[in-house]
Every structure is written in C-alpha cells, then in structure tokens.
Image (spheres, grey):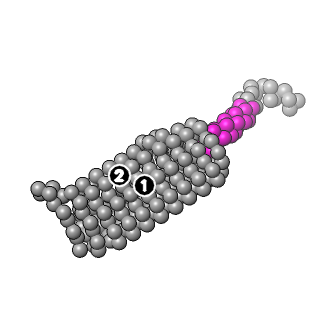
Amino acid sequence: MMDKQQDGGRKDQATLQGAAGDETTETANVTRSRAGDVRGNEVTMRQAGARSVSANHLSIRQGGAVRARAGHLEMQQGGVMLCRAESASLTVSQAGAVLTRGDVTMDQASARLLVAGGGVTMDQGGAFVLASREVKADQCGAVFLVAGRVDGTVNAVFDLRESAARAAALGAAAGGLLAVLAMSLLRPRHLRARRRD
C-alpha cells in the first residue's frame, strides 16, 4: 500500500508500507517495507530495506540499503553495502564500504572499507581498511590503517607509518646483502685465482 500527498502535481511526501517499486519525492518515510529505488530530499527508513537510496539527508533505523548516496547519512542499527556521502554517522551498524568527503562518526559500528576526506571518530568500532586524514579513536581496530594523524587507541595490524619504517629497514638490509653478494660475484677472476694458490 502506498499513500501519496500531491500538491499541484508535485510529490511532497510519500509514506511507503509493504512492497514498493521506485519512488521519488521531497520527503519519504519508508516503514516496515521494502523498496526499489527511493529518492528524495529527506528520506527516513525504519525497519525497512531498499535497493538504492539517494537523499540530501538519509536516516536509517533498523533497516538497510544496498546502495546509498547522501549529503548526510545517519544510521542506527542498520546496514548498507555501499555508501557515498558528504558525512556519515553510524551507531551499532555495519557497512561494506563508506566513502565520504567529510567526517565520519562510528559508535560500536564497523565497515570493511572506510575512506574519509575529513576526520574519523570511532568508539569501539572497527574497519578492515581505514583511510583518513585524522582518526580519533577509543578501543578500535583496523587491519590496514592509513592516517595522517591518530589520537587514541587503534589496534592496527598494518599501520602505514610503522609499515613504511619496517619496509625501509628491510629494504636497506636486503639492498646491503645484495650489494655484498654482487661484489663477491663480480670480483675479478685473477683475485679469486690468487686466493686458491
């Protein structure tokens, strides 16, 4: 069932209940339903799912979307496979990939890929790949961490700063070993022959 209020042919508000197809509106409230593509200025999803959502302000509560594009995403107890946003706030939520130009706040949330142009604030969260200019964290984890500055506790398996230093040290040691090996192999034959006599 779909209720629409129209004003002069323009859709101002849509409330979707049950199964719905594509919907474009100024304000959309999707409750306890599934939708195909939802587009609007303000979209609120409660206990609902959608294939694709595009909104200036997107709010997801106990729901999910396969793809989301938003000016600001606010998600509580939800999930999204791919999110592109200006900024995002995830609370007790899961995400496949979150790509933002601005800041991201995660509270007891996780993402497989988190790339933020601004800063990331995490509290008891995690990411497989975390890339940001600045990370403020408390009791968080990441497998790959790429950050300009880190404040707080992030347990990273591969931290770019530490990994770069380890790679440089390993490269210098390997380079030195190869140089010694090359010098011994390239030494003139007559010097090697003298040593045999």
Dots 2, 1 in contact, CB < 8 A? yes
Mark 2 lies on residue:
57
Looking at the picture, does residue 188 appear above or below residue 137? above
Q: Which residue corresponds to the image point at 50% horizontal and 50% vertical from the top-left?
A: 105
Is 194 placed left or right of 165 in the picture? right
* Nearest to the observer: residue 19 or residue 164: 19
Lateral position of residue 61 relative to residue 43, left or right: right
* Chief secondary structure of the magenta portion: helix
Residue type at the position of mark 1: Glu
- Name the residue at the right extreme: 197
Crowdedness of circle 2 by 10 Å Cα count: few (<14), some, many (20+)?
many
The CA distance from mark 2 to mark 1 is 8 Å
Callout 1: helix, strand or loop? Answer: strand
Label 1 neighbour load within 10 Å: few <14, some 14-19, many 20+: some
Of all residues shown, which one is farthest toward the left? 8
Residue drawn at point x = 56 percent, y = 58 percent: 108
Q: Residue at x 32, y 58 (%)?
A: 43
The image quadrant that residue 61 belongs to is bottom left
Image-based side of 121 in relation to 139, left or right: left
| Residue 23 is inside the magenta segment | no
Where does the magenta region start and end? 159-180
